[in-house]
Image (cartoon, coloured by chain):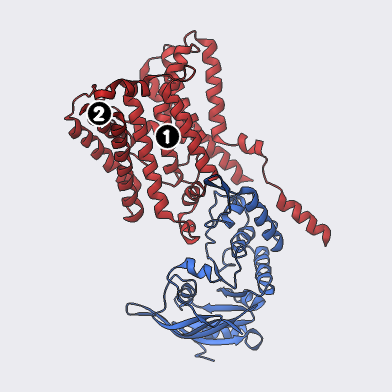
Amino acid sequence: MSTTENSMDKTIGQKQRSWLSEKLSSQTFWVFLAVVIAFIYLSFATDSFATSKNLYNITRNVTFVAIIALGMTLVIITGGIDLSVGSVLVLCSMVLGVTMHAGYGIEVGIAAAIATSLLVGLVHGILIAYVGMPPFVVTLGMLSIARSLAMVASGNTVVFQFGPDHDLLLALGGGAWFFGIANPVLYMIVLALITGFVLRWTRFGRYVYAIGGNEHAARLTGVPVRPIKVAVYMISSLSAGIAGIIQTGWLGAITTNIGTGLELQVIAAAVIGGAALSGGVGTATGALIGAALIEIIRNSLGLLGINAFWQGCFIGGAILLAVSFERVRNFRQNDE
Amino acid sequence: MAILELNNISKHFGAIQAVNDISLSLAAGEVVGLMGDNGAGKSTLVKMIAGNYRPSHGTMRMEDKELVMHKPVEARQHGIEIVHQDLALCNNLTAAANVFLGRELRLGLGPLKILDYAGMNKRAGQIFAELKSETRPRDLVKQMSGGQRQAVAIARTRLSNAKIVLMDEPTAAISVRQVAEVLNLIRLLRDQGIAVVLISHRMPDVFAVADRVIVLRRGRKVADKKIARTSPEEVTGLITGAIEQV
């Protein structure tokens, strides 16, 4: 009897898969490997890739998609989707631009932009979690509304003068205050660390996964499903708002067509990085890696002298390849 | 002594009388089989005990105090735990995460509170050992057998000091070997002095573990008998209406 009990304790103490095998079987790991291989290959194959100027550009270009992909990943983990991020980005940029152009300081401008993004997310959350409308439809509606509001706010003009704090805004987005790393990259790293921490170590993060895994079960076990969903959509819009603020500082001008089609790039980054649109799966690291792969593909095609028209094929191919990897792995698992 | 008493409980939804004037009592360490055809009122009755519905008429008393609940969380606070028919598990989470879902253990980290992974894995492992189930706390529920999934769902009821465990069709969708596992789990709960209500369509399971069987038909209680003093044939007759009442 005692031996069987011992063996049972041992079984209970075990873990089915080791840390290493778990990593090796994750889509995120293979995409990461692809990024590393592409990086090494391009460093040798071209003279222009591994230059500090090009790497500076790549890392900075990654950030806008990556920051929004962090928020999007949370939404996708709950089993939702947010199509409005490109429009929310331009709306928040415009709110920032118009406020500062009117003579207010940068604090007021940023506060207004962030408040706008949170309000948009709140509207999404209420319509989705409390009214019960599908996320696709709600955020599709907002995709149209937010860009239209940005046009109304600016009279569809280009805003490029930002009042008394003009230079500060441009330095915030376009500068490189630490070790020559572009500021947006630093913001991205900080936000990714926060997102990763929240997902892994907080009860909120646990509930986000639980809702995506089985919303009904989450509700039955006492998870506050609706408030969490509202929070997740607010975070997604917030990430678009933050990206909008940073991008404004970097570009130094806002037109009402920035961020057009951005939602698809962001969703692509999240999905390539391992987030499952069916919910329950996704990581902050995955969002960054997915965004990095897309940017490397875009950047390298240019450097390798391949016609830019091919870009869509390569990015689309990467999406299909990354997700098919996951499917193949699932087939194998189900066969066993 | 009765741990839970229902006195003349009724529940109607508009014109539909789902549960009609039912009285029953549960004692500690007792397994009661609750049987009846679809629509007999089993789920409605259980949902009232679980705090999902409030009775239209009648009262519930738990340990001689009147029991009035407005939502399921309150049932849990009173020591009433439910194992849902679909088990309410998240496949993408580990066994331990599922056990603690909705009542995670946390550690203080300055102003923050972080999830206590080690503590939850350890406690879940202890519960699985108590339940004599070879279930590993750190494995994903996705990869588990029906019996292990049951163990995870039942382990939830062991977190608090549950006095009553309501089990909704726990053996409906699992293999024969796993049914035996689940029935053993029910006996384990009983041996710890917990009252178990087993809602089931499966006659052999009820006769294997229950001390008493209560049969509902069209919202009314038509039988409340010791298992030793009835037979599967009689219970079948009561369920279908071939036998009117005993």
The amino acid type found where label 2 is placed reads Met
In the rendered image, is residue B137 in sight? no
Q: In which quarter of the image is the C terminus of chain B?
A: bottom right
In this orientation, which residue lies closer to the viewer: A322 or A332? A322
Q: Name the residue rendered at 44%, 47% in the picture.
A: A78
Q: Which residue is drawn at 41% across and 14% down?
A: A302
The secondary structure type at the circle numbered 1 is helix
In which chain is the residue bearing label 1?
Answer: A
Give the vertical position of A80 relative to A164 (above or below): below
Residue type beneath disc 1: Ala
In the displayed structure image, the side of residue B93 where residue A211 appears, left or right? left
Residue B107 at x, y = what percent? 59, 49
Q: Pinpoint residue A60: horizontal percent, then vertical percent.
A: 42, 22
Q: Quadrant of residue B10?
A: bottom left
Q: Residues within 10 Å of mark 2 (few under 14, many from 20)?
A: many
From the image, tell me which residue sits under label 2: A100
Residue A18 picture location, percent across and down: 68, 40
Q: Nearer the viewer, residue A7 or A148?
A: A148
Q: From the rendered image, report the letter of the chain displayed in blue.
A: B
What residue is disc 1 on? Answer: A69
| Circle number at residue A269 | none
Chain letter belonging to callout 2: A
* The colour assigned to chain A within the rendered structure: red
Instruction: Choose between B240 and A276: the one closer to the eye.
Output: A276
